[in-house]
Amino acid sequence: MSTATAGGAAASGPTPSATKRTARRRTLMGTRPWVVALFLLPALALLGALVVYPIGYSLWRSFFDAPGDGFVGLDNYETVFTDDAILTAVKNNIIWVVVAPSVATALGLIFAVLTERVRWGTAFKLVVFMPMAISMLAAGIIFRLVYEQDPDRGVANAMWVTVHDTFADSPPFPGAHPRPDAGLTDSGGGSFTAPEPLRVGAPTAVPLVAAKRDDIRGAADAKAAKAEPGKITGTVWFDFTRGGGRHNVLERGEKGLADVEVEAVRDGKVVATATTRADGTYTLPAEAEGALLRLPGSNFKEPYNGVDWLGPNLVTPAIIGSYVWMWAGFAMVLIAAGLAGVPRELLEAARVDGANEWQVFRRVTVPLLAPVLAVVTVTLMINVLKIFDLVYIIAPGTSQDDANVLALQLYKSSFGTDVNQGVGSAIAVFLLLLVVPVMFFNIRRIRRERRR
C-alpha cells in the first residue's frame, strides 16, 4: 500500500506479495518453522530411535540367515508360512483377535448398562476395574494358581469338583485292582474280567489289592461265600494280611469290600448285576451261568480331580478368560462414559412408542454407542495381537506349544534355544503388517469423528 506525499511521490509500504511470503514462513500458531523444528527435534529423535530404526532394522534383518551374514531373500518369510509352530501361533492369534475383544467388549457393555440402574453401581465398577491395576505378570501368576489341576490349590477346580461331587457318586475303592496273579484281565475302561465262566454252586473268589487305608477302615471281616442251589455266589475282599500271608487265599482278619458292583457279561451284554455285602459276598441269579464275571471300572476310578484347564485342549480359552478378567473393566469404563452422553430423550421416546427394554437396548442404545464400541474393540484387537505375558506365564511347558502366539514365537525364535533372528525378524514384520490395517482403520474413524 502507498500514500501520496506533498511532492507527488508515493511512499511505498509492504506489498501484498511480501505479506504472503512472510505469512508462509509462519505456521498457524504464528511460529517460524525453524522454531517448530527445534521443539520437535527431541521427540522426532526418540521416535526415530525407538520406532523407525527398529522397524527398518527388523525389515533388513529378515532377509538374512541366522548368523546375519548370508542373504536368503524371502526364505525366512517362507518359514513363517510353513513352520508348524508358527502356523499354530497364527491360528491362536486369530482366535485371540476374534474372541477376546468381542467377549471383553460385550461384558463391558452389559456391565455398563446394568450398573447404570443400581445404587451400588459405582462400587461394582470399581471392583470390575480393579484388575487393570495389576500387571500382566502378576495376573499370569494368579491365574496359574487358579487353574491348578489339584482342587486343594486351584480355585477353578475346587469349585468345579464341589459341584461335580454334589451330583455324582464317589467310587467305593478308587485306585484298587485285582491281584495281578488272580487271573482277571483288564478289559478296558478300568474294568476287569475273569477268564472262566460262572457256574452255579461254584463260588468265585476275587482278591483285590491297592485299596486305600481310609476306604477299608472299619470294614467287616470277609467271609468265604457258600454254594447255594440255583444261585451263583462269590466274595470280593482285600487280600492283605499284616505281617505276610498267602496270595489269593481268604485268610482270617482280611476285610470284605462292600458296595462293589459285580456284573455277569455274555457276548458283550450284561445279563445280571449284584452288589457286594458288608462281608464282601455277592449273589447272582442262575441265568448268569456261563457268563463272565466283570468288575466295572466305576468301582475303581480315581477321584474326580476337575478339569485340566492348562491341558492342550483348554489352555488357550483358559488364558483368554484371564485376559477378559483384566480388560472387561477397561471396556466397561469407556462404554459407561459413552453411555453418559446418550440423550435420555431418545430412550424415553422409544419407551413411549411401546418398545420394551430389550428393544430399547438393541435398537437405540447400541447404535448410539457404536463409535465407543468401535474404539474399545479396535484398542483390544491391537492389544491382543501383541499378547505375550499371559501366555508365557500361564501356559505350562507341556502346553506352551499349543498356546503359542506370534509374540511368544517371536521371542522363542529370536532368543530361544534355536536362535534364528532372521526368522524372528520376519515374524516381527508379519506382526507389524497385521497391526497396521487395524491402526489405519482406527485413524480413519478418528478423522471421520473430527469432521463431524
Image (tube, rainbow, N blue to C red):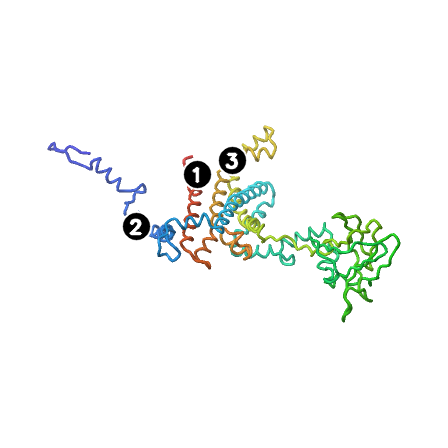
Judging by the rendered image, the residue that carries numbered circle 2 is 38
* Residue name at image x 61 percent, y 53 percent: 308
**In x, y percent, where is residue 349?**
56, 30
Inter-mark Cα distance, 1 to 2: 31 Å
The label nearer to you, 1 versus 2, is: 1
Query: What kind of element bears circle 1?
Result: helix
Question: Is the residue under label 2 in contact with that under label 1 (CB below 8 Å)?
Answer: no
Q: Is residue 94 visible?
A: yes
Residue 142 horizontal side relative to residue 246, left or right: left
Query: What kind of element bears circle 2?
Result: helix
Q: Which badge, 1 or 2, comes first in the chain's sequence? A: 2
- The mark total stands at 3
Residue 244 horizontal side relative to residue 385, left or right: right
What number is the disc on residue 445?
Answer: 1
**In x, y percent, where is residue 21?**
23, 39
Q: Which badge, 3 or 1, comes first in the chain's sequence? A: 3
**In x, y percent, where is residue 26?**
28, 42
Inter-mark Cα distance, 3 to 1: 15 Å
- Amino acid carrying label 3: it is Leu
Q: Is residue 139 visible?
A: no
Query: What kind of element bears circle 3?
Result: helix
Q: Quadrant of the N terminus?
A: top left
Judging by the rendered image, the residue that carries numbered circle 3 is 368
Q: Residue furthest top?
A: 353
